[in-house]
Amino acid sequence: LEGIIRHEFVFTQPPEEVWNYLTDPELLALWLMPNDFKPVVGHRFQFKARARLGLKFNGDIYCRVLEIIPFRKLVYSWQGGMSKENPSLDSIVMWTLTSSPGGGTILLLEHKGFRGMKNSLAWFTMNIGWAKIGRRLRNHINQKTL
Amino acid sequence: MTKQVLDVFQVIANPERRHMLQMLSKESLTINALARNFEMSRPAVSKHIKALNDAGFISIQDIGRERYCTLKQEGFIELQEWIEHFDNFWKSRLQKLQALLDSKAPKK
């Protein structure tokens, strides 16, 4: 249950090139969201996503750069909800880049540390006995961690 | 008196509230019966019950003089929806990145 959301993508491009798309605000905006990212530890920035009011999410994502190892690792916090002061979602986004044998890149995304979530998921699948939801969640998580 | 509605994450982050949910997973209980299991004031218990109710984890039913709490799925589904939302979000964005890189990949 360490990584709640986990995606691994393989690119034919080398890590340096993929890294640019993770750290250059203009390139980042091309595929992720408008942002004012800077590759500086401690830098606070925002992403602008589409609002999802059903999820009580107004679309503003507040982030802070936590760790940078050039071409290898990038970590930032990821908070959002209906207000900056009281975010429902308080989580961590971690990018890990590894060279693949053919000169490409294996890019691993982990979105984790959901506040209130880490301990609760395991707890409620085990204790509450909502078998259906529990099973769906477990399948969901196992898929991601295989 | 602060009026603040807690979201599902905040609600489930609290160990007392988790304990209440756990007890309610076995059977519906009156607020009084629930309160007997906790070393806290009745107002404190009521506050937790209210938070659980507001977030959709339980429903409260008045039967005679008693108020019964019953577990409800809504809150749990909302938790799952958050996760699923971002899971799908990342997947589609990463596919976009892949397409983007491939479209401009200089052949070596």
Image: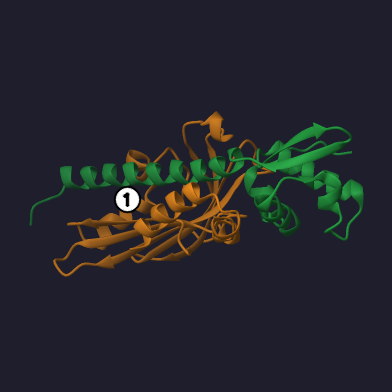
Chain colours: A orange, B green
Left or right of B71, for residue A121? left
Left or right of A55, for residue A140? left
Q: Which quarter of the rendered picture does the C terminus of chain A lie within?
A: bottom left
Q: Dot 1: within a 10 Å radius of its alpha carbon, few (fewer than 14), some, or many (20 or more) residues?
A: many
Left or right of A101, for residue B62? right
Residue B62: percent from left, percent from top: 81, 32
The reply to whether residue A27 is visible in this rendering is no
Element under disc 1: helix
Chain ID at mark 1: A
- All told, the count of numbered labels is 1
In the image, residue A33 above or below residue A145: above
Nearest to the observer: residue A119 or residue A71? A119
Please give the name of the residue rendered at 81% of the width and 44% of the height, measured from the top-left corner.
B30
Nearest to the observer: residue A145 or residue B1? A145
| Disc 1: which residue | A21
Left or right of B7, for residue A38? left
Please give the name of the residue rendered at 86% of the width and 38% of the height, measured from the top-left corner.
B66
Amino acid carrying mark 1 in the image: Tyr
The reply to whether residue A98 is visible in this rendering is yes
Please give the name of the residue rendered at 40% of the width and 52% of the height, measured from the top-left corner.
A140
Q: Quadrant of residue B75?
A: top right
Please give the name of the residue rendered at 47% of the width and 31% of the height, measured from the top-left corner.
A50
Nearest to the observer: residue A129 or residue B54? A129
Residue B21: percent from left, percent from top: 69, 51
Residue A114: percent from left, percent from top: 56, 54
Residue B67: percent from left, percent from top: 82, 38
Residue extending farthest to the bottom is A101
Residue extending farthest to the front is B64
